[in-house]
Image (cartoon, coloured by chain):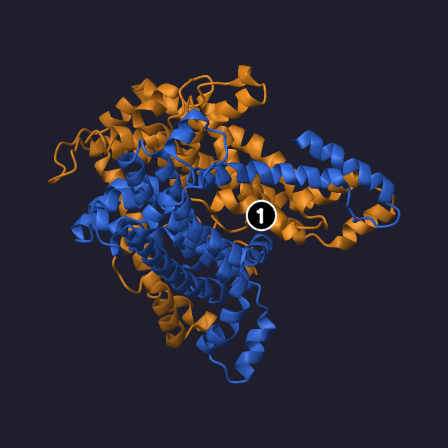
Chain colours: A blue, B orange
C-alpha cells in the first residue's frame, strides 16, 4: 500500500508544481484514500452487517451479505435489560472518571506551570514517572486495596483507580498549555485586580480549553473501553461495564454468532458517536500538546 | 533561569519525595521556609498549592504509587492472596521467573512486538499523515475514519477479529473467493503466523493514533518553510525529507516512546483473542498475560507481583534509556525535573 501511495503522490506533484504547489487532485490519491478507509472500516462493517444475518448464513457463507436483514438480533439485545444496565454503568464510570481527571489534572497543572515552589520539579517528575506505571503492574495490589476499602463490585472501585492512572498523561499534556499562556496576560490580569485563583478561572480555564477537551476525550474513551480493572473489581453481573458485558455475552451465547455480533456492534456506537462529535478538537488539542 | 536550573539540579536525584508522605494532605508546602523570603511565596500561595495539588496527590499516591509499592513488597513472598503474607522467600520468585522458559518466550515476544510496531506503524503512519495533510475532498471524513479503530474497545476488536480470523471465518472465505486460496491459514493458532496476525491487528487498531499525532505535528510546521523550499526548486520528496521530517522529529520521537511502552505492557488484545493458555503455545504471550496467567489465575499472588515488578523494571529501563539518548532534547524536564 505504501508503494501505491508513493506512486500516486509523485505524478501530480511534477505536473502542477509550478502553478499551485499544494493542489492535489489526482484520482490515484483518492484511490489510496479509499483503500485505506476500506481497510479500516471493513471489520467494523462486517461486525455490524453480521448482526443482521442468521447463524446459518454466517456458517455457510462467512463473507456474504445479509439476504433477509434480520433485525431480531438487534431487537433482542435492545429490549433486554442487561445491555442498558451496562450502558448506564459504563456511562457513569466514564463520566465520573473524566470529570475527576480533568478537575484534578487541570488544578495541578496550573500549580506546576505557574507557581514557583520547592519541590515543583520533583512533583512534575513524580507524575511524569507515573506514566511508567501501567495499570497491569499494579492490578493485583489494587484489587486488594479496593477490597480493603470495601469498594468491590461498586463503580467507585473502578472510578478512583482510573482517575489515579489518568492523572499523569493529563498533567503532561496540560502543563505546556498552561505554561504557554504569556506572563503578560497574568500581569495584566493582576493589575486589573484579578487574584491568582481568579486568573485560573477567568484566563487559564478558557485558554487551556483545547487541551482540556483533548484530555477529556482521551480519558473518556479509555475509561469506556477499559477492560482489566473492571475484570478484577466487578464480579457481579449488575455492575458490569460494556466491555465485560460483551465478553460475558460472547461466552454465554458462543454458538449464537449473529447475536454476539449484534451486541458487539451496539456496544461500540456510543464511543463512536462521542468521538465523531469531538474529533476536530482532538487534532487541535494534540497540536498544542506536542508543540508545547 | 539560572535559579530554576540550580533548583532542578538539586532535586533531580530524588524524584519521588512524595512517597514517604502517603496520606499527608499538604505534602508539598511545608519545606520552603528558607526560600520564602527570597522567592516571595506567601501563605496564601502555599494554601493554594496545597488545596489544588493535595487531592491529586492523595488519589495518585494511594491508587498508583501505593499499589506499585505493594507489588514490590508481595513479590518477596509466596502468597496466595488471602491473609497476611508470611512466607518470605527472598529472591526465589525472581529466580523462578528467569528460569522459566515461558517467561523468556513472553519477553522475546514483547521485544518483537516493540520493534515491529515501530517499523510497521511508524513509516506507514508518516506517509498517511502526509497524505491526509493535503487539501483534498473528504479530508475530515477520512481523518475520522482512520481514527475509528483506535476508539473501539479492545474487547470489541478482539471479539470481532477472532470471529473473523478463525479457520472457517470470513478472512479465509474471502481469500478463497478471490482466488488466493493458497493464502488461507490458521491465523490464530499457527505459531509461525500468530505473531504476525497480532501485529496486523495492532497496526490496524493503533495506527490511527500515530496518524492523528503526526497530523497535529504537521500542522505546527509553518507553511512558509515548505513554500520557500518549493520556490527554490526543491521537489516534493526533498521538501518532506529535508524540512518536514526533521521538524516532525519531536512528534515522532514522542510517539515512538508511547508505542514502545504500550507494546511492553500489551495485555488486553492478546488475552481476549488467545486467552491465557493458547497465547503461550501460539507464540503471542506477553509479560502481562504471563503475569495474569501465573499470578492471579494460578492463585500465586506473590509470584504474580514479582512478575509485575520485573515488567515494571524492564519498562522503566527501556524508558530511561530512551529518555537519556533520544528524547532528551524534546521533553526537557519531563523526567529530569523541570530543567529548561
Secondary structure category for the residue under label 1: helix
* Residue B9 higher or lower than B275, as above or below: below
Q: Single out the residue that lies furthest toward the top.
A: B182
How many marks do you count on the picture?
Answer: 1
Q: B286 or A291, which lies in front?
A: B286
> Residue A215 vs residue B216: left or right?
left
Q: Could one spot residue A132 in this view of the protein?
A: no
Q: Please identify the quarter of the rendering in which residue A57 is found.
A: top left
Q: Name the chain letter of the residue that bears numbered label 1.
A: B
The residue carrying pointer 1 sits among few (fewer than 14), some (14 to 19) or many (20 or more) residues within 10 Å by Cα, namely: many
Which residue is at a point 66% across and 32% down the rendered structure image?
A: A2
The location of residue A117, given as percent across then percent down, is 43, 65
* Residue A178 higher or lower than A55, as above or below: below
The quadrant of the image that shows the C terminus of chain A is bottom right
Identify the residue position indicated by label 1 in the image. B212
The location of residue B61, given as percent across then percent down, is 31, 53
Q: Could one spot residue B156 in this view of the protein?
A: yes
Which residue is at a point 33% across and 23% down the rendered structure image?
A: B278
Q: Single out the residue that lies furthest toward the front.
A: A68
Q: A224 or A151, which lies in front?
A: A224
The quadrant of the image that shows the N terminus of chain A is top right
The location of residue B265, given as percent across then percent down, is 40, 36
The location of residue B200, given as percent across then percent down, is 51, 30
Q: Single out the residue that lies furthest toward the bottom.
A: A193
Q: Please identify the quarter of the rendering in which residue A227 is found.
A: top left
Amino acid at each position: 500500500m505504501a508503494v501505491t501511495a508513493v506512486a500516486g503522490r509523485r505524478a501530480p506533484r511534477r505536473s502542477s508544481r509550478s502553478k499551485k504547489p499544494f493542489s492535489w487532485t489526482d484520482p490515484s490519491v483518492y484511490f489510496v484514500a479509499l483503500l485505506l478507509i476500506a481497510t479500516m472500516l471493513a471489520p467494523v462493517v462486517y461486525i455490524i452487517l453480521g448482526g443482521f444475518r442468521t447463524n446459518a448464513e454466517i456458517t455457510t457463507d462467512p463473507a456474504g451479505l445479509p439476504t433477509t436483514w434480520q433485525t431480531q438480533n438487534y431487537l433482542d439485545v435492545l429490549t433486554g435489560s442487561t445491555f442498558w444496565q451496562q450502558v448506564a454503568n459504563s456511562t457513569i464510570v466514564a463520566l465520573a472518571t473524566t470529570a475527576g481527571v480533568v478537575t484534578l489534572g487541570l488544578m495541578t497543572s496550573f500549580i506546576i506551570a505557574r507557581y514557583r515552589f520547592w519541590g515543583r520539579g520533583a512533583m512534575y517528575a513524580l507524575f511524569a514517572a507515573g506514566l511508567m506505571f501501567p495499570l497491569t503492574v499494579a492490578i493485583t495490589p489494587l484489587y486488594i486495596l479496593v477490597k480493603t476499602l470495601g469498594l468491590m463490585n461498586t463503580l467507585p472501585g473502578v472510578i478512583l483507580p482510573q482517575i489515579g492512572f489518568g492523572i499523569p498523561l493529563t498533567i503532561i499534556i496540560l502543563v505546556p498549555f498552561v505554561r504557554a499562556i504569556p506572563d503578560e496576560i497574568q500581569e495584566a490580569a493582576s493589575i486589573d485586580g484579578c487574584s491568582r485563583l481568579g486568573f485560573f478561572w477567568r484566563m487559564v480555564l478558557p485558554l487551556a480549553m483545547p487541551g482540556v477537551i483533548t484530555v477529556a476525550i482521551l480519558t473518556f474513551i479509555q475509561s469506556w473501553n477499559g477492560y482489566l480493572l473492571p475484570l478484577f473489581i466487578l464480579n457481579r453481573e449488575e455492575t458490569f461495564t460494556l466491555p465485560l458485558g460483551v465478553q460475558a455475552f460472547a461466552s454465554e451465547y458462543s454458538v449464537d454468532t449473529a447475536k454476539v455480533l449484534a451486541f458487539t456492534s451496539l456496544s461500540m456506537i456510543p464511543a463512536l458517536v462521542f468521538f465523531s462529535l469531538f474529533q476536530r478538537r482532538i487534532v487541535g488539542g494534540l497540536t498544542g500538546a506536542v508543540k508545547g | 533561569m539560572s535559579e530554576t536550573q540550580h533548583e532542578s539540579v538539586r532535586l533531580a536525584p530524588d524524584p519521588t519525595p512524595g512517597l514517604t508522605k502517603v496520606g499527608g494532605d499538604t505534602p508539598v508546602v511545608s519545606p520552603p521556609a528558607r526560600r520564602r523570603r527570597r522567592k516571595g511565596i506567601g501563605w496564601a500561595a502555599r494554601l493554594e498549592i496545597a488545596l489544588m495539588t493535595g487531592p491529586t496527590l492523595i488519589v495518585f499516591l494511594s491508587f498508583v504509587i501505593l499499589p506499585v509499592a505493594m507489588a514490590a513488597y508481595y513479590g518477596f513472598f509466596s502468597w496466595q492472596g488471602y491473609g497476611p503474607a508470611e512466607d518470605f522467600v527472598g529472591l526465589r520468585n525472581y529466580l523462578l521467573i528467569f528460569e522459566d522458559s515461558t517467561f523468556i518466550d513472553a519477553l522475546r515476544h514483547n521485544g518483537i512486538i516493540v520493534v515491529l510496531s515501530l517499523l510497521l506503524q511508524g513509516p506507514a503512519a508518516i506517509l498517511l499523515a502526509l497524505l491526509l495533510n493535503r487539501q483534498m475532498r473528504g479530508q475530515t471524513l477520512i481523518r475520522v475514519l482512520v481514527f475509528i479503530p483506535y476508539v473501539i474497545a479492545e474487547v470489541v476488536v478482539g471479539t470481532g477479529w477472532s470471529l473473523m480470523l478463525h479457520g472457517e471465518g470470513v478472512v479465509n472465505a474471502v481469500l478463497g473467493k478471490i482466488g488466493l486460496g493458497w493464502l488461507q491459514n490458521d491465523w490464530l493458532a499457527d505459531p509461525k503466523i500468530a505473531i504476525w496476525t497480532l501485529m496486523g491487528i495492532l497496526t490496524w487498531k493503533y495506527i490511527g493514533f500515530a496518524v492523528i499525532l503526526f497530523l497535529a505535528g504537521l500542522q505546527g510546521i509553518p507553511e512558509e518553510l515548505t513554500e520557500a523550499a518549493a520556490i527554490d526548486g526543491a521537489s516534493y520528496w526533498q521538501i518532506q525529507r529535508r524540512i518536514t521530517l526533521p521538524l516532525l522529529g519531536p512528534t515522532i520521537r514522542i510517539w515512538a516512546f508511547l508505542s514502545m511502552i504500550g507494546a511492553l505492557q500489551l495485555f488486553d488484545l492478546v488475552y481476549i483473542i488467545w486467552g491465557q493458555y493458547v497465547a503461550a503455545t501460539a507464540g503471542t504471550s506477553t509479560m502481562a498475560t504471563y503475569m495474569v496467567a501465573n499470578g492471579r489465575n494460578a492463585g500465586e499472588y506473590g509470584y504474580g507481583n514479582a512478575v509485575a515488578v520485573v515488567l515494571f523494571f524492564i519498562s522503566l529501563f527501556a524508558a530511561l534509556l530512551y529518555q537519556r539518548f533520544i528524547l532528551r532534547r524534546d521533553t526537557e524536564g519531563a523526567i529530569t525535573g523541570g530543567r529548561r
